Every structure is written in C-alpha cells, then in structure tokens.
Image (tube, helix red, strand yellow):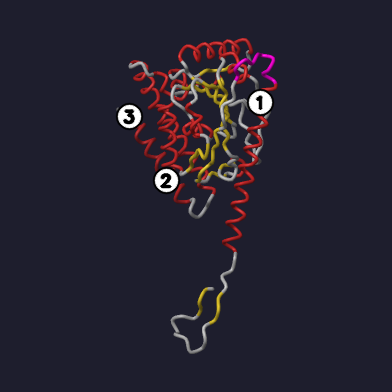
Amino acid sequence: MAILSYLVTGLTSYFAITVSLFGLSLKIPRAGFFARCLAAYACLIACASYGLVASIVLRLVGYGGLSQWTVARSFKWAMRLCTGTYFEIVSGSEYLSTRPAVFITNHQTELDVLLLGTIFPPYCSVTAKKSLSRVPVLGWFMTLSGTVFIDRANRETAVKAFDGAAEQMQRERQSVLIFPEGTRSYSAEPALLPFKKGAFHLAVKAGVDIVPVVAENYAHLLDVKKLRFEAGMIRVKVLPPLSTKNLQTSDVDELTTKTRESMLEVIQDMYKTREARYTEEASASSIPTNRVAMPPHASSTSTAIET
C-alpha cells in the first residue's frame, strides 16, 4: 500500500506541475518547452507500459508482428492530445503498404519517436542502439516487440543482427525501419548527416525494396538549444520504393549516395515551400486596409467603409 501511495502522489504531482507549466506558458513561452517535454515523457512511459502488455497478448494470439505498430499509433494520438504536436503525411502514404521493405527516414531529434507513430506500418520492427534495451519499461517493451538492437561498438555483432533481420524479413515478410544517419542531427537547417550503409546492405541481402520517408525540418517547432517546443503540424513525404532487384554488395555505395541525394532534395524543397508560405502569410497580414472617409453628414455609427 505504501508503494501505491507513493506512486499516486508522484503521478499527481507530475500532472499538477505539467498543467501549471502549460498555464504559465501563456505568459512565459519557454514554460511551454518544459510542459511539453514532461507531457511527452509521460506519453512515452504510458504507451511503453501499454506496449509491454500488448506485446505479450499479441504474441499469444499469433500477432506479435503488430506489437510496435499498435503502440506507435497509441503514442501518435496521445502526443497530439497532450502536446498538440503531430506529423502528417502529405504525399505517398500508399507506399507504406510495401511489404516487406526497409523503411528509412531522417533523424532530427528525440521527437522522431512521434514520427514513427505516423509512418510505422503493420508488421514492421524498428532498429535501435543496444543501450536502449537497458532502459526500464521502454527497453523491456522494445525487446518483447522484436526490436533489432545494434551494437555500434562491435561490428561483428552488428553484422549478425542484420543477417538475422534479413532472414526474418524473408521468412515472415516483416519490414524494418532504420535511421540511416545513425544518430540525431539536431539541425536547424534542412540537412542530412552522412548515411551509414547498414540499411542498404540489409535491403540488398534480403532482396526487398527501400522506401525513403522524409520529414520536413521542424526546428521552428522544436529546438532544444533555444528551449522551444511548440504545438504544430510537421509534414512528411513518403517517396516511391527503390528496387534492389539484381543489385549486389558492390552496388551499395552508389545506392546509398543516390538515395541520400534524393531525400536531401525533398527536405530542402519542403523547407523552401514552408518559408515561402510563411512569407506570403506574413505579407498578407501586414497589408494595410484602405479606407475612405465618409462625408460629414453620414451616420455617426459608420465613419468609414472598406474598399
């Protein structure tokens, strides 16, 4: 009972602090950063806890491949409700039905967990650094749901992990989602870090398509250095699948380079489009309204008309 009491007290305090910060953000915008961070962590822990149960139940009924998909969707809606921040696919959603496939996407910040909630297809597993497997609750869920953990410090075990993933993809038609940059970029500009080749080697080895997914740069909504975390929509484009049919290991370098170039072009175009839209909206809102004065004998209740 004592443990339960401490838990209830802790959760109540957490909720009260979060709500207070949201209220304070109306006058102090930076308070919104901390409020949304607290709300996001609460959503993550809640959905991971749900995922622990869901993974066990779905495995028992033969649908273990849906574990990460169902949790990703729950996180998507929880975050939209609690923070007002969400990703929206604006083109290419039909390509997410490609199965099996290696899905790749750009990696900007920790918020990309929310991106997964939008793009994650059924029967797909994410890859993650091995250290995440040791995180309480989240790591337990990821292990139970079939996450492909990669030990970047040990190339031999990393290769074995990808070999196992390739076999599973062929055997169970299970897709895999990978961040080819390998780490978060935290870029304030529409840019991509150099791509690692693991995702492309995996696709060639398994003989499956690569489906690139591009999220626009969202530093205007989330910038950790500036303590900015605002509500808003982040656009996502899913690009046409790239076939790896008849490709060999020797083709991986060229495949990696061309894929990165195509994704970079899209993310830069999305940035330009957004900036142009903001500029147009700002110009429209700053245009003064032309008014013509009424003659002296006009009604005192109407002193001007718009033209």
Residue type (three-letter) at the residue carrying disc 3: Leu
Cα gap from disc 1 to disc 3, whole angstroms: 47 Å
Residue type (three-letter) at the residue carrying disc 1: Phe
Cα gap from disc 1 to disc 2, whole angstroms: 40 Å
Residue 179 point in image, percent of width and height: 58, 26
Residue 149 point in image, percent of width and height: 54, 18
The answer to whether residue 118 is above or below residue 209 is below
From the viewer's side, name the closer residue of 31 and 47.
47
From the viewer's side, name the closer residue of 74 and 291.
291
Instruction: Report helix, strand or loop for mark 3.
Output: helix
Q: Which residue lies under the disc numbered 1?
A: 195
Q: Which residue lies under the disc numbered 3?
A: 4
Question: Residue at 60% of width from left, 40% of height from top?
Answer: 217
Q: Is residue 62 magenta?
A: no
Residue 267 horizontal side relative to residue 98, left or right: right
From the viewer's side, name the closer residue of 217 and 17.
217
Question: Residue at 64% of width from left, 16% of height from top?
Answer: 247
Q: Residues within 10 Å of mark 1 (few under 14, many from 20)?
A: some
